[in-house]
Amino acid sequence: MMELSLKLSRSEKNKLPVIRQDQISECGHACVVMISNFYGHDIDLFSLRELDTPSLNGGTMLDLVKLLERLKLKSRALRVDIEELGKVRCPAILHWDMNHFVVLKYVGHNYVVIHDPATGRRKILMSELSSSFTGIALEVEKNDEFKNIHLCNRLKLVNLFKNVKGIKSSLLTLLLLSLAIEVFILLNPLFLQYVTDNIATTTNLNNLYVIATGVIILTVFHAFTEYVRSNFVIYLTNSLSEYFSSGVMSHLLKLPLEYFERRHKGDILSRFHSVNEIQSKITTDSINTVLDGLVIVLALIIMSVYSWFLTLIVTSAFTIYLLLRAISYNHLKNQTEISIGEHANVNSKFLEIIQSIMPVKIFAKEETMYRSWKNYFIKAVNADIKISQANIVYNVSNILLFNFEHVLVICIGATLVITNQFSVGMLVAFLAYRQTLVNKATSFIHKIFEYKLITIQINRIADILTQPLPPEDPNIVKEHIQGDIKVENVTYKYPGNSKPIFDKISVHIRQAEKVVITGSSGIGKTTLLKIMLGLIPPTEGKILVDDVSLDALGQRRYREICSSVMQDDSLISGSILDNITFMDAKIDIERVYEAAKIAQIHNDILSMTMGYETLVGDMGSSLSGGQKQRILIARALYKKPKILFLDEATSHLDIAKEIKINAALKELQITQIVIAHRQETINMADRIIDLSNQAYP
């Protein structure tokens, strides 16, 4: 078995792709995608996620076995000592750090190569393996029913800008302007040759003045063209940046809540910033690459007219440089992926620390948080260093190759001049064209591999743009919604879990009724509230509003008549007025005052120096917990909702204020659905729904 495994490992070790996980808990799915593609499937992570949604709590080895079976791959779980890893059929899935999965790609003499969904390709010494490998491996191979599966939803670069109005004409204009500039550059060596051969050796200065005047005129046109082109690039770049960023942001905001709950905030931010990298490649870089290629061809033709032999020497140098870049591309791509991922982790850790700054202070954990952040930061810096080291190798290779080539061309060119096969002007012109060719060829090769690397950014932004949007609202128009809600046979289980957290719940909440949902922590109260809000779909059953299902009513129409204060709600950066109106474009100040009075916060606001213009941060640090909750209640009431959802929304209020708020809400005759643990809050309900006892009166 050892011989067979090693043969497979060595002969097929370059066919295993590196797949990075997008979600927090989908490392197992990423491993399955890697191995599936190794055996001939064409599957991406998004498509596998649609086929089998990973659990938020992560998966087990048994879950992976079942998923592999669906893909016609059979597997076998093994308990393996580190010394016996060489006997494992590769690629195999390894259980890692007690809470993670990686793919074993190759077993060497004293090291292993793994593909880690979190960090990419890694080479680990056997001596370091015991700190992470738990001893459980999963061998995988094709079963007898195996057939190639094509299940991909890849985002193509052209799809990002094919709908941009005027993009083709704009790029054509930019191409023509850039081409004019390159023509000016290609004419300069001819001027040098003419002056050297025909004027420098004579006493006739008239021709020199005429030629110089012509060159000056061309230079002015060159400068003017460069000015126009640069301004056009600024306009085009900013227009595309606005188009792409707006499009991605619009799509992102329309995605369901689940998307954000399954990803780190820093990672979402990093993916959004990938737009900038992509749009720069589409505009100036794409045009420059095309022009570089065109100039290379023209320069080679002109140089070949001078001397095909000297041209061959120059061509050989950048061919060697191209091969060097091609050979090391996979290493650079892997390091780039690692760097992007590590910087996303730094962003996530930074946001986490800032959002938790109060407990950090209270528990005196500043140093602990600093060390935690620094560990992530050092990993990101180390990843950047490896990329910089690769670039240093490229630069040094470039210097060595093209300097040796330059010396060789000068020596042979001088020999041709001495033997009267070249004039001095021809040699000067050839060297000028040679310098242009080297510069353009180096730039062209660099940009080509940058384009190959841009697939990393495209794959990252694809995690946003390939996510399906919720269906459009139907055309059903219901003018007067009363606020009557029915929960009919609703069951919910988390994706990847077989056991529901609640089953077959049926409740009828009448208009203007106040219902309190109670139960032990973790039983699903907030989840039920989110289902009733339409934020997450039930596994089974449906929600009816005035006897119309949410699907038929439409999410946007429903959100217009309901409002909420959830546990994790926070204030936005701006004034108290901004927070109550939620940045409403047309503020109704009387409605603001009314909502604030009902929420018992109006007098508190007036006592502040700036009143309703008092600035608060996104965490509301200048306000007490009770004040923040009352502002959030005022924000919910500003909408004049028919249905109000409150999830522990008054937990920081004293009983007296809560009684006043409840009495004011009662007068509004709106439906209230409340989650509460405090007995005083429960006692204010018209009806109690106890999830612990499955009591649904």
Image: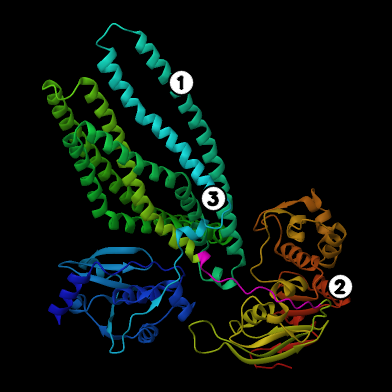
Query: What's the magenta region?
Result: 464-478
- Secondary element under disc 2, as helix, strand or loop, is helix
Q: Which residue is mark 3?
A: 167
In the rendered structure, does residue 524 fall within the stretch colored magenta? no
Identify the mark nearer the N-term, 2 or 3: 3
Residue 253 place in picture, x, y as percent: 61, 64
342 lies above or below 46: above
Q: Which residue is mark 2?
A: 664
Residue 115 visible? The answer is yes
Q: Within 10 Å of the Cα at label 3, are there few (<14), some (14-19), or many (20+) other Cα atoms? A: some
Disc number for residue 217? 1
Measure the alpha-carbon separation of dots 2 and 3. Answer: 57 Å
How many marks overall?
Answer: 3
- The prevailing secondary structure element of the residues shown in magenta is loop
Residue at screen point 37% across, 58% down: 337
Indicate which disc residue 41 carries.
Answer: none
Q: CA distance from mark 2 to mark 1?
A: 81 Å
